[in-house]
Image (cartoon, coloured by chain):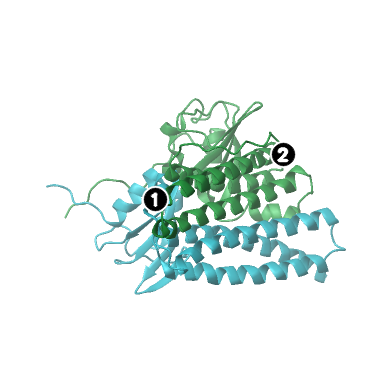
Chain colours: A cyan, B green
Amino acid sequence: MCSKLSQEQVVDMIVQLKDFSEMMVDLAYSSLIYNNEEIADQVNDMEEIVDKLYTKLELTVLRSREMQPAEVLLSSIRLAVAAEQIADAAYKLATIVKKGAKSHPILKLAMEKADETIVATTISANSILADKNLGELGLEDDIGMKIIAVKRHGTWTYNPKDSFTLAPNDLIIARGYSEGRERLLNAASPKLCDD
Amino acid sequence: MSEEEEIKYKPISIMELLTQMHSTTTLMIDLAYSAVLFNDKDLAEEVSELEEKVENLKTTLLMNTAIAIKDAVDAESMIGIMEVGGAADTISHAAADIADIVSIGLGIDQNILKAFAKTQERLTRVIIQAESILAGKALSELKLETNIGVSVIAIRRGKELVLNPNPNERLLKGDTAIARGSDVGVVELDKLAKGELKEIPRPKIGNGCVLN
């Protein structure tokens, strides 16, 4: 009966590793583009969590070795190793920022040219996004923009939940495609009609 | 596996190289997990080919940065770019390792596949039916990214596989589209592909102006 539990733990840890590693890559590129040490620090913190999670997963898999064919256990370990390597790559990117290397302007330009990229913007007082929670806004489904971090009064919230309510002056970092980006920027700081 | 490409300098801008490396590695992660999720060996094979492409891009990037560096100041400003190239290469190898699980047929715990299929941002695979309004339309007309938050990362048409389709590519009846999107978006894509949803939902968030 404890083996069923350990199997569930493995699944849960692999999903966490996948989510963490992908989020770290987004954050690492954000820290690099905006030369932001706080976001780089967050990536470092997440790297530590990933390392612990990864060790725990390996142990859990090894302990459950009689439960499943060796091939299936191996694939679980390989998925975890790959996620851990992706997290490591993100950590290296963040380290560049921590070491104080000035972000080369080419980097920002190169990222802006990619189909899918990261954008940062501030919510203005007349923004239609203000005082709505992310669940209501459904930006990911509506315009394909995923908010990966929000800064309010000097504090960052990473991967904000659906219940998170945006407020004027919040700095948001989001990932998405070109037209969605334009719509998000316009929604955050709407242009006034001429007349 | 194709033959090793000879190391040769190509006149291509550092910016273009970085854009290509970033786009390719992002695509590779999605393709690799799709290969796992749908147990698709062809997709897995494409990931290994892209791994080679990224390797070549990295070599070219290093040569270009080497040419651009004339003194210590240049070297300090370029180190970040070289590190980005290295990180992209690491991500590319990791994606290829994920794809390898499928290529060598290791088999994956069904519960992991079920869990992957339920994450907030997820991968999906749909077949375009004759009655679908998507059939015959170019991706640039459909604007699925902006309208439903879904990005088509590959199209399978018979034996042909189109990766990262360009905006002019059309979805045809019988095509299998592999896409990534939000939980809500992928359900909308599924309904559109089956012909159950006859209109593409438009974004609520417009791009107009506000009255003062």
Q: Chain of mark 1?
A: A
Q: Quadrant of residue B186?
A: top right
Task: Name the residue located 66 percent from the left edge and 69 percent from the top edge.
Answer: A53
Residue A113 location in percent, x, y? 40, 44
Percent x, y for residue B57?
Answer: 54, 43
- Please state which of residues A182 and A79 is positioned toward the viewer in this rendering: A79
Say which residue appears at 64% left-offset and 69% top-offset: A51
Location of residue A163 with respect to B146 vertically, above or below? below
Where residue B184 appears, as percent x and y from the top left, is: 51, 49
Depth check: give the residue in front, A99 or A10: A99
Q: Nearer the viewer, mark 1 or mark 2?
A: 1
Q: Residue at x 64, y 61 (%)?
A: A84
Question: Which quadrant: the N terminus of chain A?
Answer: bottom right
In the image, what residue occupies the spot 49% across and 29% down? B169
* Disc 2 residue type (three-letter): Lys
Left or right placement of residue B181 versus residue B96 in this view = left
Marks 1/2 in contact by CB < 8 Å: the verdict is no
In-image side of B124 versus B208 (left or right):
right
The residue type indicated by label 1 comes to Ile
Q: Is residue B110 above or below residue A54?
A: above
Are tags 1 and 2 found on a single chain?
no
In depth, the one of A162 and A68 nearer the eye is: A68
Look at the numbered disc 2 and give the secondary structure of its residue: helix
Q: Is residue A65 visible?
A: yes
> Camera-side residue: B9 or A5?
B9
Task: Say which residue label 2 marks.
Answer: B41
Task: Give the class, few, some or many, for how many residues have Cα within 10 Å of label 2's Cα (few <14, many ≥20).
Answer: some
| Residue assigned mark 1 | A106
B79 relative to B8, above or below: below
Indicate the chain on which mark 2 is placed.
B
Q: Residue furthest front?
A: B71
